[in-house]
Each structure stands twice: as C-alpha cells, then as structure tokens.
Amino acid sequence: MVVRDVMTEDPFTIEPEASLDRAVDVMCAKDLRHLPVVDQAGQLIGIIAERDLRRAALAPAVDEDVPAGGQRPLCRPGQAPRDLLVKDVMSCDVLTTHPEAPLAHAARVMFERRVGSLPVILDGRLVGMLTEKDVARARADGRIGGAFDPAGILW
C-alpha cells in the first residue's frame, strides 16, 4: 500500500500573510490539527500545527522565561500575540512524502520524527496530506496489517 491510497487529497491550505485568528478559524471549522502554508504559486513553504498556535497563545508568559540564547521570542516588544501572522509561527522545515511512497515508510517517519502529518508533494505541488488519522483509519479498516481486533487493545 502506498501513501496515495490513504492520504487526504486536495487539503485545505492557508497563506503566510493570514492572521492567526484566520488559521484558528479554518482549523476549528474543518477539524484540522495541521494546516499547510502555501505561497501564491501553491508551493508548500511551511505548516502550522496546533502546537504552534498554543505556543503563540502562551508567548507572552513563556518568552519571559526563555534564557538568553534560547528560542527566539514570538512577539517583538509592543506586539501582541493577536497581531501575529501565520508566517510568524509556522514551521518552515517540513518533512514531506510522495504519493507513491510506501505507507509503512511514511508512517515510520511520522512515528520516529514525532510529527502528526506529512504533506504529500508531487512535481513540487501539494497534492495531499497524510495524517495520523489516515494511517489509523487504514489500519482499523484492515487495509494495512490485517484485520483490526478491538479485543487486542489495552484500555
């Protein structure tokens, strides 16, 4: 089985100049935990995740405790978190995959690198998203790894 078989096609995206409020609205309305950030040409330039939004919301409190040489502060003096744009908090170093990549390989990358999604890129263009939910659904449906046995789950 390959990524194309289980990925979410034509994912929702957002532009880097959008406000964080807009990102929150889209993510809540569409029940998303990860939102690809694309430029005007549709090229993937980053991703914004729930954890990025939480960090932005907590920035004023957290930034006071960041030691010199630590992570760069999100807010500049006089700037409120509500003034931040997607480009201010998105992750730029995004792991991606290809539609024909083996699903097992993509799932392993997600597990080992502790990411909840992989943008799927074909010919430089975003064509889908592979999420933890997609992998879990394929497993539960018996499309990978045999039939799902709920009795085998520890609750």
Image (tube, rainbow, N blue to C red):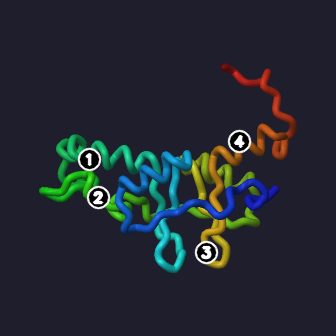
- Distance in Å between CA atoms under marks 1 and 4: 33 Å
Q: Kindly identify which residue carries mark 2.
A: 84
- Distance in Å between CA atoms under marks 1 and 2: 11 Å
- Tell me the SS state at disc 1: helix
Residues packed near mark 2 inside 10 Å, few (<14), some (14 to 19) or many (20 plus)? many
Q: Position of residue 125 (x, y in %)?
A: 61, 74
Asked whether 57 or 104 is in front, the reply is 57
Residues packed near mark 4 inside 10 Å, few (<14), some (14 to 19) or many (20 plus)? some
Query: Going by the image, does 48 lie left or right of 84?
Result: right
Q: Kindly identify which residue carries mark 3.
A: 125
Q: Kindly identify which residue carries mark 4.
A: 136
Q: Kindly identify which residue carries mark 1.
A: 59
Q: Position of residue 62 (x, y in %)?
A: 24, 42
Question: How many numbered marks appear?
Answer: 4
**Which amino acid type corresponds to the residue marked 2 in the rendered image?**
Leu
Quadrant housing residue 121 = bottom right
